[in-house]
Amino acid sequence: MPRTKSTLASLASLTVLAAAGAAVTLAAPAQAASSVGGTITRGEVIARAQSWVDQGVPYNQGAYHSDSNGSYREDCSGYVSMAWHLNSSLVTQTLPNVSTKISFSQLKAGDAMDYTAAHTFLFAGWTNQATGAFTYYAESNTNNPTHGPTAANINSSSLEGWPTSYYDALRYDNIVDDPAPVTHMARTVGGDFNGDGKQDIAGIDANYNLKLYTGDGAGNVGGGTNMLGSNGLWKGFKTIAAGDFNGDGKQDIAGIDANDNLKLYTGDGAGNVGGGTNMLGSNGLWKGFKTIAAGDFNGDGKQDIAGIDANDNLKLYTGDGAGNVGGGTNMLGSNGLWKGFKTIAAGDFNGDGKQDIAGIDANDNLKLYTGDGAGNVGGGTNMLGSNGLWKGFRSLLAGDFNSDGKQDIAGIDANNNMKLYAGNGAGTVSGGSNMLGSNGLWSGF
């Protein structure tokens, strides 16, 4: 099976893993998630293909390359066989035996282009499907060994030295789309859940259980006990908030559930919650809300809920002190000013006795919006720097975690560590110490 040298330019770092055009960095080694001849994700196919590029595997029809991927022939069809994790190195004529012919327009990352008489290569993804631009991986000849992601266009008269019309698009029969990425929303909160006068952290973990991490009053937390069952009862909850919503002096949990209803789970003051009653209707009124926070925003002594709605406005739902909320007024404008905010937390950060809102904005800065005690907020000053220091943080918690009488900020950073930023009582925070270990223990929260 002769090969001709490709004249297409190489892209150094990026390929597209889906027809939708999402760019993914290709620096990771091949994954071993699949079994030989078994189901394999598109992401793993691309990772396996990249691994031969990273190793600089040469072209040699008479040789086999052996590594953690297995042992496969060092030519075009051997390369595709390796990427698909087949049980042997097929040839261009037999690759159709384990795949299905599709149209060019259906091509996705991990599919192949196969000219049965001479050549095959691996489709890496569209860079612009409307114009036909894509990238690919291939073993071409001794002068052009394993390479990719390489730029090409499906409308070109030839690809890899052969007329484009000679190729069939093939989809491996055992390939599957990658699972949708997990979207971590604000699912951790601060509060004194066990009644010892120290701020704790509650959060929904990767197994959808609500866990309690008790605070020591010095900025650290420990433990990890279930607050309500252990069978994934919190699956589908988007975001939670903590406060004494029913006026019994104990911290409760409010959360938006899988049906987009705001539910109340009352606390017993010993680290447990129970119940699950609707706080406002039961018809999915909270659909599209991105994050919520609890506080007495209107100064009536009752816990309210503030949240960023589907239109990117910050809305106030006032509490009645009996576990219900109502209303839905704008706390700052009505023109989507909160677009791009990842998460918010409520507390008196400037020490004036009124509840404020802190939030990570679209530029990854922590902003302070001071409350007026009547249900409105204003401002938007930086609480720590202005250079995107909060990039990757997905959750914010407010509380006096170090017992100095000032509101602090805790949050889960990009490395899945819970970090503490101590407040100064004047609207700014500093620090960034770990509250529990430093090995990504908060992954999945």
Image (spheres, grey):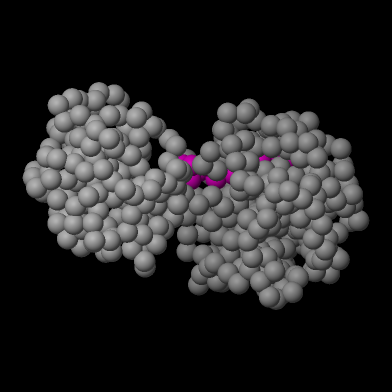
Vertical placement of residue 293 versus 131, above or below: above
- Between 5 and 128, the one lying in front of the other is 5
What span is colored magenta in the figure? 198-209
The quarter of the rendered structure image containing the N terminus is top left
Residue 18: x and y in percent read 36, 55
Specify whether 98 is left or right of 232: left
- Between 355 and 432, the one lying in front of the other is 432
Vertical placement of residue 38 versus 363, above or below: above
Vertical placement of residue 201 versus 235, above or below: above
- Between 415 and 167, the one lying in front of the other is 167
Residue 320: x and y in percent read 72, 67
Q: Is residue 31 visible?
A: no
Q: Is residue 205 magenta-colored?
A: yes
* Residue beneath the point at 8% across and 45% down: 93
* Residue beneath the point at 58% across and 38% down: 416
Determine which quarter of the picture holds residue 198.
Answer: top right
